[in-house]
Image (tube, rainbow, N blue to C red):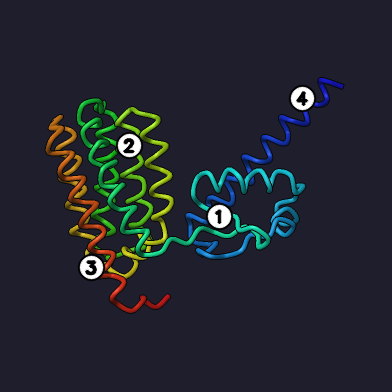
């Protein structure tokens, strides 16, 4: 009986992880829009699982700041107001500064090459002003940088913050594709500073990059949305 309970628990945990990853993919990929209601029974039926793993996945996604639970209403994809986004950008700037400083101190040559490869791709899609292709490269750049910082607590807090800003980061790039080359040059300067182990410069460039990203957001939201 104990062995059976252990197996059931492992199966439940595995299914919860799979459901969580699929819902996270849909949210971060824009398939599930901010404010969309997530219906437990529908998701369970669609993914071919019981309601238990879906319920547990909702809890994990709420901890990751991707969904919110409203009493007597249900679970919704998190929607961050512009005022909240402004405050989150300030926190992100502080975290990115620390990331830059630690990455410049700890990055390995192989990690530098990976980040440079991403920047090279950024230049290529920038010439075409391809916002859809640029967005995942932007995410990958910052993910590789925070990994190079070598601090798991910092990485967890950074990911929670950027998850909250996902809607606005995507919208900024979509509405301001003409700024992609400028943003790419900022990324290139950052990796150059990190590769030279210049902690102060890497910190300053990343803080400035985030603050400028916030300004680009405000300019982007003043424009009409691009046609699909």
Which numbered disc, 3 or 1, marks the residue that appears first in the sequence? Answer: 1
Provide the residue designation for mark 2: 146
Q: Nearer the viewer, residue 206 or 31?
A: 206
Q: Residue at x 87, y 22 (%)?
A: 1
Provide the residue designation for mark 4: 6
Provide the residue designation for mark 1: 68
User: In terms of secondary structure, where does tag 3 sit?
Assistant: helix
Percent position of residue 134, x then y: 33, 57
In the rendered image, the residue lying farthest to the right is 1
Provide the residue designation for mark 3: 178
User: In terms of secondary structure, where does tag 4 sit?
Assistant: helix
User: In terms of secondary structure, where does tag 1 sit?
Assistant: strand
Q: Which of marks 4 and 3 is in front?
A: 4
In the image, residue 17 above or below residue 186: above
**Total numbered labels:** 4
In the image, residue 175 above or below residue 15: below
């Amino acid at each position: 009986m104990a062995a059976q309970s252990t197996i059931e628990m492992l199966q439940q945990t595995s299914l919860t992880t799979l459901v969580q990853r699929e819902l996270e993919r849909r949210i971060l990929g824009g398939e599930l829009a901010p404010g969309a209601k997530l219906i437990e029974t529908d998701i369970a039926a669609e993914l071919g699982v019981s309601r238990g793993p879906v319920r547990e996945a909702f809890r994990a996604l709420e901890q990751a700041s991707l969904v919110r639970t409203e009493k007597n209403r249900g679970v919704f994809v998190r929607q961050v107001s512009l005022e909240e986004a402004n405050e989150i950008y300030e926190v992100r700037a502080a975290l990115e500064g620390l990331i830059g400083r630690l990455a410049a101190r700890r990055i390995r040559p192989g990690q530098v090459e990976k980040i440079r490869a991403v920047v090279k791709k950024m230049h290529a899609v920038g010439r075409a002003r391809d916002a859809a292709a640029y967005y995942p490269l932007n995410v990958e750049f910052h993910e590789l940088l925070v990994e190079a910082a070598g601090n798991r607590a910092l990485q967890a807090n950074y990911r929670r913050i950027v998850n909250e800003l996902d809607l606005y980061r995507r919208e900024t790039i979509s509405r301001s594709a003409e700024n992609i080359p400028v943003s790419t040059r900022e990324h290139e300067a950052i990796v150059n500073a990190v590769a030279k182990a210049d902690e102060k410069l890497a910190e300053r460039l990343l803080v400035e990059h985030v603050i400028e990203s916030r300004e680009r957001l405000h300019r982007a939201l003043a424009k009409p949305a691009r046609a699909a």
